[in-house]
Image (tube, grey):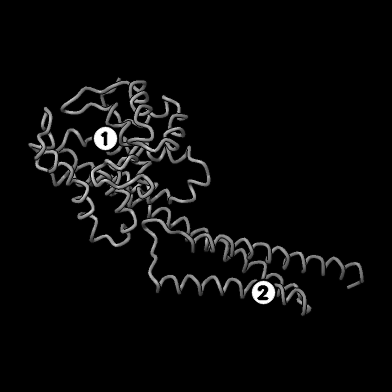
Amino acid sequence: MDFSQSIYFLILIYSMIGVGVVVMITNIYRYARFMKMQDILSSNSKKDAGWKLTGLLLLIFFLFGYIAIGIFSKPDLMVASILFGGSFFVMIVLTLLFRLIESVKQNCLDVTEVLISIIEKRDPNLNGHRRNVQNITMLFYSYLPKEIKKQINPLSLEYAALMHDVGKLGIPEEVLNKPGKLTDEEWEIMKQHLKIGVKFLEPLRNFEHIKSWILYHHERIDGTGYYSVPGDQIPLAAKIISIADAYSAITMKRVYKDPRSHETAIEILKNVAGKQVDAELLAIFLKIPKEELLACLPPDIETL
């Protein structure tokens, strides 16, 4: 092999190792993001955290191995090929793993939605409202600034919106479906649906951090809600769900009332900004086009 050929050969070898290093750095970055995942379906046990950390340390070890081989040894084409292929093999495995996890999470969400929809058929007030709130909440999330989005995991938020009224399944039908105004005693019974909902979720340990989102989504910024929690102590996610829930309640038909228009709902929400709902969040909500909000309604739901 002449000199020019050996130069090209070395360029090829070190290019393959260089690409392998870049791919491994990308793998480490993707894996580190995976480790930070704190959504409702992710395992956050100490045992799994230990395994995740071990995986990260091994990836870093391999990266330094790539660099050390490139700098301190004289790798041949075989070694370069192994390093090059190894980095892409890790990338493929991580990609398949992340896709599998997302698929499992989506399937769990779909199954949960179906089960709750079946249960809600007993209550004409819940049928459609839960899905509407869920859709509006996630639409609302998409309009939030990045600094607010960073504070809430979207999958956890979606589950909280999905289950925000699940406690109403424990409320007597004569109270839940009463066409007229509730008495003080009946109202106290109705207010229990939040605690009942949290009680339903007790066996699900991964749902622990969204219980307060469900429990406090009827709290008011002025501190006169169900539990008199002041605005600065209401979870951010609960404030988001509260706005979505209020808009849905106004615009959807109930046993005891007809639906009201989008424009009426917006005016009502503006009037309670800073009192019932968070004014800053409402300002963001008001930027959502009417067409997108109306598109959140489930099919065959009566509205204006």
| Residue ID for mark 2 | 64
Q: Residue at x 35, y 27 (%)?
A: 271
Q: Is residue 189 left or right of residue 229?
A: left
**Quick check: 243 above or below 102?**
above
Where does the image place residue 61, in percent across and percent down from the top left? Answer: 61, 75
Rounded to the nearest angstrom, the CA distance separating label 2 from label 1 is: 54 Å
Where does the image place residue 275, in percent across and percent down from the top left? Answer: 34, 35
Splitting the image into 4 quarters, where does residue 63 fall? Answer: bottom right
Say few, some or many: other residues with alpha carbon within 10 Å of mark 1 (under 14 / 14 to 19 / 20 or more). many
Is 45 in front, or is 300? 45
Where does the image place residue 73, in percent across and percent down from the top left? Answer: 77, 80
Q: Secondary structure at mark 1?
A: helix
**Quick check: 295 above or below 130?**
above
Depth-wise, is mark 2 or mark 1 nearer the camera? 1
Considering only order in the chain, which callout, 1 or 2, is on the residue closer to the N terminus? Answer: 2
Query: Looking at the rendered structure, which numbered label has been put on residue 129?
Result: 1
Is 91 in front, or is 43? 43
Residue most toward the right?
A: 3
Q: Is residue 75 left or right of residue 257?
A: right
Quarter of the rendering occupied by the C terminus: top left
Q: Secondary structure at mark 2?
A: helix
* Amino acid on which the number 1 mark rests in the picture: His
* Amino acid on which the number 2 mark rests in the picture: Phe
Q: Is residue 100 left or right of residue 272?
A: right
Is 284 in front, or is 292? 284
Quarter of the rendering occupied by the N terminus: bottom right
Q: How many marks?
A: 2
Splitting the image into 4 quarters, where does residue 178 fall? Answer: top left
Is 218 in front, or is 153? 218
Q: Is residue 143 left or right of residue 24?
A: left
Residue most toward the bottom?
A: 73
Q: Residue at x 48, y 40 (%)?
A: 144
